Amino acid sequence: MRSMLMYKHTQPGYLTIGLLLSAAAVMVCLAIVTRAGVALRLGIVVLLAAAYVFGSLTTEVDHERFRFWFGSRLIRRSFLLSEIRSCRPVTNRWWYGLGIHRMPDGWLYNVSGAQAVELTLQDGRKLRVGTDEPVVLCEAIRKAQQR
């Protein structure tokens, strides 16, 4: 049975969706004009799938865990609250970009904007999770850890 939910928020990735759908639209036009082969059609499918998978980022806190997932829930992570040493609101540098990738000192998971929470885990690993509510999310994690 799942613990009682204390916080849940979904940040839409309008820019991510817009860029991916725009690129797919350009590729559709190219496919029509050039009577595209399989590679171009496959590229269109990949872009549409990426828009579906990365269209939003949901964060959730209950009495035991912090979870987050991208739109389709295909890509998700979960941490016990006891694994989290600290949480702080941060502003990502613009060149950190969007998506999932390594940063200089950890991993980034982001669909939109520069705001995030930086989690430091008990083993010293760091990760940043994008959100348009970084202060509220950190407060929810701290409150849940105090229970």
Image (cartoon, rainbow, N blue to C red):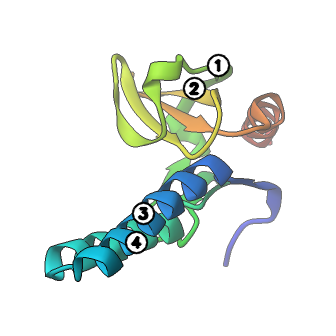
Cα–Cα gap, marks 4 and 2: 41 Å
Contact flag, marks 3 and 2 (Cβ < 8 Å): no
User: Which quarter of the figure is the N terminus placed in?
Assistant: bottom right
User: How many numbered discs, if any?
Assistant: 4
Image quarter of residue 134: top right
Contact flag, marks 1 and 2 (Cβ < 8 Å): yes
Q: Earlier in the sequence, mark 1 or mark 3?
A: 3
Contact flag, marks 4 and 2 (Cβ < 8 Å): no
Q: Earlier in the sequence, mark 4 or mark 2?
A: 4
Q: Secondary structure at mark 1?
A: strand
Q: Nearer the viewer, residue 145 or 55?
A: 55
Residue that mark 4 sits on: 29
Residue 118 numbered mark, or none: 2
**In the rendered image, the vertical position of residue 46 relative to residue 137, given as above or below:** below
Q: Secondary structure at mark 4?
A: helix
- The three-letter code of the residue at mark 2 reads Glu
User: Which quarter of the figure is the C terminus placed in?
Assistant: top right
Cα–Cα gap, marks 1 and 2: 6 Å
- The three-letter code of the residue at mark 1 reads Val
Residue that mark 3 sits on: 26
**In the rendered image, the vertical position of residue 141 relative to residue 63, given as above or below:** above
Number of the front mark, 1 or 2: 1
Residue 90 numbered mark, or none: 1
| Residue located at (39% from left, 66% from top) | 47
Cα–Cα gap, marks 4 and 3: 5 Å
